[in-house]
Image: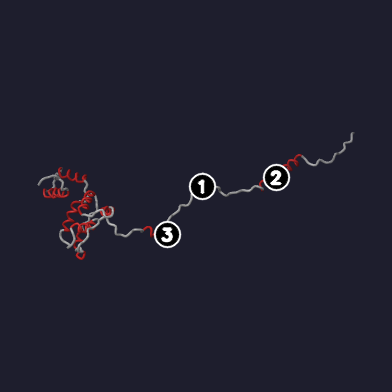
Amino acid sequence: MPHLRSHGPVKHTFEEVDLELETVADSSAEVKVSNLKFDFTPHPTPHNTPPSSPRISMAANCTVHQQAFDGFTGNRSSIATPAITNPNSWQIPSYIMTAIANDKFHGWDDEDAPAHLSRLARIVSTFKLQGASDDAIYLHLFPFSLADRAIIWLDSQAEGTFTMWEALLSAFLKKYFSPAKASRLRDQIHSFRMEPDEPYYLAWERFQNLLSRCSQHGLTP
């Protein structure tokens, strides 16, 4: 039987060789990863450039509250009243102010603008002020006869728009007694009929009320 001479023990099995290779690969990977440097700081690009903060320019030594009220005096008015030659006599009787305050025009669709002007003229005709023209009196008192939408309309006009009563009266009628409204009233007058079982005197009063609301009714007495 031939003698088999031993060449020494086998140093590694195949399994051990594979394990060593994996260990070497892992260690080299750890070395590579440890040498990497990560930078998480965002860098602007044409697509993600952050917007710049808005700049607010304010006058030197001026607060926001001061800027909000800059130029505000509280004296703005669309009416420029004529000068009074005798300011010492410029005192409206209290009963006049009460009568005007009790008969305000609000600007509602069913209100009668010409009738309001007629009542105002009747009130103003009860007194005179020395050194004050009729224009001055009407321009001073008319705003006190308005309320709600009507006074908002007057206040919305440009400052100093009205210097004469005639111009203010015309603008007021144009706003609250338009040609379309006058046309509807004329149609009601021309097609007036008594209601069934309506007393004659009530029908007559209703007809006269329509006539008073539209002076352009086109009927002769």
Q: Which numbered disc flags the more N-terminal residue, 1 or 2?
A: 2
Residue beneath the point at 57% across and 49% down: 41
Q: Quadrant of the N terminus?
A: top right
The way the protein has been coloured in the rendering is secondary structure
Q: Observer-nearest residue: 121 or 69?
A: 69
| Residue placed furthest toward the bottom | 88
Position in image of residue 74 (x %, y %): 31, 59
Query: Which type of secondary structure does the marked residue at label 1 adopt?
Result: loop
Crowd band around label 2 with a 10 angstrom C-alpha radius: few (<14), some (14–19), many (20+): few
Find the distance from the CA under tag 1 to the CA under tag 3: 32 Å
Marks 2 and 3, how far apart at CA: 66 Å
Q: Which mark is residue 116?
A: none
Q: Earlier in the sequence, mark 1 or mark 3?
A: 1
Q: Which residue is mark 1?
A: 49
Q: Nearer the viewer, residue 52 or 117?
A: 52
Between disc 2 and disc 3, the foreground one is: 3
Q: Are marks 2 and 3 in contact (CB under 8 Å)?
A: no
Instruction: Tell me, yes or no, if residue 124 can be seen here.
Output: yes
Instruction: Read off the residue under disc 3.
Output: 60
Mark nearer the N terminus (2 vs 3): 2
Point 89% across, 34% down: residue: 2
Pointer 3 local density, CA inside 10 Å: few below 14, some 14–19, many at least 20: few
What amino acid does circle 2 point to?
Ser
Q: Type of residue at label 1? A: Thr
Give the residue type that dot 3 points to: Ala
Between 88 and 105, the one nearer to me in the picture = 88
Dot 3: what SS?
Answer: loop
Pointer 2 residue? 28
Image spot of residue 18 (x, y percent): 73, 40
**Residue 69, above or below 109:** below
